[in-house]
Image (tube, grey):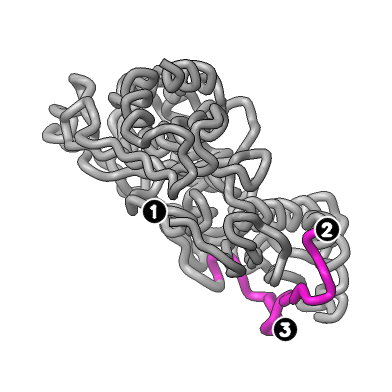
Amino acid sequence: MAKNGRHLFTSESVTEGHPDKIADQISDAVLDTLIAEDPMSRVACETLVTTGLAFIAGEITTTAYADLPAIVRETIKDVGYTRAKYGFDYETCAVISAIHEQSPDIAMGVDPGGAGDQGLMFGYACRETDELMPLPIMLAHKLTRRLSQVRREGLIDYLRPDGKSQVTIEYEGDKPVRVDAVIVSAQHSSLVPIETVREDILEKVIQAVVPAELLDEKTKYFINPTGRFVTGGPQGDCGLTGRKIIVDTYGGVGSHGGGAFSGKDPTKVDRSASYMARHVAKNIVAAGLAEKVELQLAYAIGVADPVSIMAETMGTAKVDESLLVKAVREQFDLSPRGIIEALELRKPIYKPTAAYGHFGRNEEDFTWERTDKADALRAFARR
């Protein structure tokens, strides 16, 4: 249910240089390379990164060829770990691969068009931002994107690739009214004074991103609150694929089915059905049928159609929620095959999703962000 009165809500994001996000990007870079050559590739690629080591494992069935160590090193290089003094770099790290084929027991259910596993997936949309996303996660992502931008463009040339942000929004009922707190932690050179780091990030990152009308004299800023962030990336923390599932989705707003996305081809409903659930939810809100909605889909392994569909509008629906579910069933093919075709998921589009969130993005290949079904949903509701 919607909350009344004043309350706070917080979401976080991390940069592409965070160790967990390096792992996600490697897994999705492997997926993209294989699916570009063989669109029917079955991929479940997991990555671990730590000091001096990148380890990839999982199940892959494909007719494509990929130089896996080269993909790993190129991804690490793109992120920005290019010098040994960063504690981790693409040239000197070891790369170990433990890849084998997908289980024939799983393939038996997937080949006819069924789901690759059981599970529950959630999609969410609301009117807080132009992207129809919750404001806290959108601001958190914009802060980490800006951290990367000022590093890459040399605007703050002492920054290193690792970094995190966190934004606390104060709400009046369902309406975001101000930013209560901003946290930014950025990896940096050991030679720069912490006062310089804090001044530059406040001016060139926070104030460049957060709308001025949301900031006031009571807004709290925590910039590198421990005072030093020199050791970072895989040297400072072991990274694993799929360990930032809340960063990847809605920042803690709504529910999460528990499945991660990166490294999985679209026959895995953990990924594809979550994308479709976001697509459906966004179209419901864009159609004006609810101010916010959380959609749940649930699947059984080897079965094409979802075993259940739920729409929860938290009291904001303009029509009965049972009618919303009927509209969803009529307007969307929710089988794995139907999702793959509708969202054009057999393309090498996945690596860009592996940092800064899978949702609320306006890039062309983020097909699940289209609102092309809004008119049809609106017409159905008027019957």
The disc label shown at residue 227, or none: 3
Mark 2 or 3: in front is: 2
Q: Residue drawn 68% across and 55% down?
A: 139
Q: Earlier in the sequence, mark 3 or mark 1?
A: 3
Q: Residue drawn 41% across and 15% down?
A: 383
Look at the image and tell me whether residue 81 can be seen: no
Distance of mark 2 from mark 1, alpha carbons? 30 Å
Q: Tell me which segment is drawn in magenta.
A: 213-235
Name the residue that disc number 1 marks.
Answer: 255
Q: Residue drawn 39% across and 53% down?
A: 255
Name the residue that disc number 2 marks.
Answer: 213
Q: Earlier in the sequence, mark 2 or mark 3?
A: 2
Q: Would residue 377 be counted in the magenta stretch?
A: no
Distance of mark 2 from mark 3, alpha carbons? 29 Å
Could you tell me what secondary structure mostly forms the magenta stretch? loop
Image quadrant assignment for residue 136:
bottom right
